Amino acid sequence: MSFKVIKFGGSNLQVATDFSRCAEIVSGYEAPCVIVLSAFFKVTDHLKEAAMQASESGDFPRIFIEEFSDACFEQVKVNIDDDLLVDQTGKELQDLLDKLTRLFRGVHSIGELPPTIYDTILSYGERISAVIFNGVLRSKNLESSLCLPEDFGLVTDGEFGAASIRLKESSKKIKGHFTGKQYYVVPGFYGISDEGKTTLLGRGGTDYSAAALAYLLDAESLDVWKDVAGFQTGDPKIVRNPGTIDFLSYNEAAELSYFGARILHPRTVEPLQPKNIPVRIFNINSPSKKPGTVIGPDPGGEFTGPKSITFSRNFSVLKLKGPGVGIKPGVLARVAGIMDSAGVNISSVFTSQTAICFLLQGSDLKKARKAIKVQAPALISDVEAISDIALVALVGEGITRKKGVAAKAFQAVAAENINVEIIAAGASTAAVYFVVKESDCERAVSATHGHFYTECLNQDSYQHSDLTSVVL
Ligand code: ASP
Ligand code: MG
């Protein structure tokens, strides 16, 4: 029996009738299928705000709960005709809303938001979507049931907020579930630790849940529905006439997501790659049933130019200065150890004779700076934290093996009078990146994109403007 895994995200769930629209799409798939759902648009953000409000300001988020409940019941009413199913789904929904309210009460009365409660509260967006959607599918006469990560065993490493899925353990537990030729609805975004705690998979984590399910069920494909065509050569808000990319290798998709493209969670391809399961990205607004972008194994072949230029403002740099810090044995290991014990994830390191630069997630900069200031080796005379930077990445399999690509990008950026602060390549064969001042980011991206791509005449194809000159 061969499964397809289908994922709908918040961008597919923006108005009440969207559940019916997604159900219509599901009915075009032959069972067995697993449908993995995100929370309704913005609901995760609102749950987060309400939880913070309850713990910090002493206000019980009564208005949020009321409005949220009304919106959920409206979705049931609008999408389900059958009275019995309205009743049944309404009861399941009310049960979840009651539990959520009790969680808010707990947080409100203790005035604290422990990570375990935070993760549980935020998982309610997905839990609620899944209950409603299961009712909607059944009302359209599709044989469907709800399957929860705690029931079929989507096991995580237990790290709150950003857990990893343990595929081996999960694959033992999943046996005996998903055995029917029917539809299964699964809430995304969370798994369960060994202790039975709800652990979130990081923001946007429903893609990662869906990928893990595709792996666990040896699915034929993972179909991700979006409200855009797929990956593009550049961000349409910044570059002129970006094209849609037909095909990306797993590495290319992972690098693009890591460096800022907001199409997929960066860990999505991880479970799929060992089994060569393709990801197909579909646009819910496009009547054609053709995927915009397909992601799969690298077919090999010559590098012919970067496939996409992406950027991120979420990175920061911590510069540790001191005579000889870059070459004195042991200094790098020591400071990396300090970062590690402070819970800071290092994205990249560059060293010189007199400085060590760490590329960090923007949200980790303060923590890292504090830890280093307290524990730094005597050799470090100055610590500089730079937060107003942006990282621009050029992605394409084999990019680091081709001479001159980076040089071309820098020429384009230099022509705009933009100073490149840091350049890096080599950690992956599919990405080259450079760091500029945040205020220069958009111009740098647009100049680089403009350099590598000519204007596209249609959304489905793009051409490199000067493939030959890419190779110096
Ligand atoms: N609802 C979650 C979020 O907003 C997970 C997801 O959308 O994938 O991050
Ligand atoms: Mg999402």
Image (cartoon, rainbow, N blue to C red):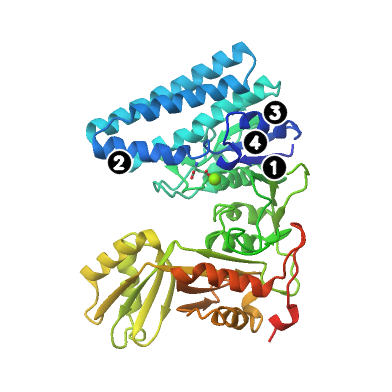
Q: Is residue 242 above or below residue 146?
A: below
Asked if the residues shown at circle 2 and circle 1 are in contact, with their CB atoms under 8 angstroms apart, the answer is: no
Q: Which residue is mark 2?
A: 114
The residue under label 3 is which amino acid type?
Answer: Gln
Q: Is residue 202 above or below residue 361?
A: above
Q: Which residue is mark 3?
A: 182
Query: In this rendering, does residue 78 appear at all?
Result: yes
Q: Is residue 443 left or right of residue 330?
A: right
Residue 414 x %, y % = 54, 82
Judge the density around disc 4: few (<14), some (14-19), many (≥20) Cα neighbours within 10 Å: many
Q: Dot 3 lies on which element?
A: loop
- Quadrant of the image occupied by residue 285: top right
Q: Is residue 228 above or below residue 129?
A: below
Q: Dot 1 lies on which element?
A: loop
Q: Residue at x 77, y 47 (%)?
A: 290
The label nearer to you, 4 versus 1, is: 1
The quadrant in which the N terminus is found is top right
Please tell me which of labels 3 and 4 falls first in the chain: 4
Q: Is residue 471 left or right of residue 189?
A: right
- Quadrant of the image occupied by residue 327: bottom left
Please tell me which of labels 1 and 3 falls first in the chain: 3
The label nearer to you, 2 versus 1, is: 1
Q: Residue at x 59, y 73 (%)?
A: 447
Q: Which residue is mark 1?
A: 285
Q: Which residue is mark 4?
A: 34
Judge the density around disc 2: few (<14), some (14-19), many (≥20) Cα neighbours within 10 Å: few
Asked if the residues shown at circle 3 and circle 4 are in contact, with their CB atoms under 8 angstroms apart, the answer is: no
Q: Dot 4 lies on which element?
A: strand
Q: Pick whichever, 234 or 318, lies toward us.
A: 234
The label nearer to you, 1 versus 3, is: 1
Please tell me which of labels 2 and 3 falls first in the chain: 2
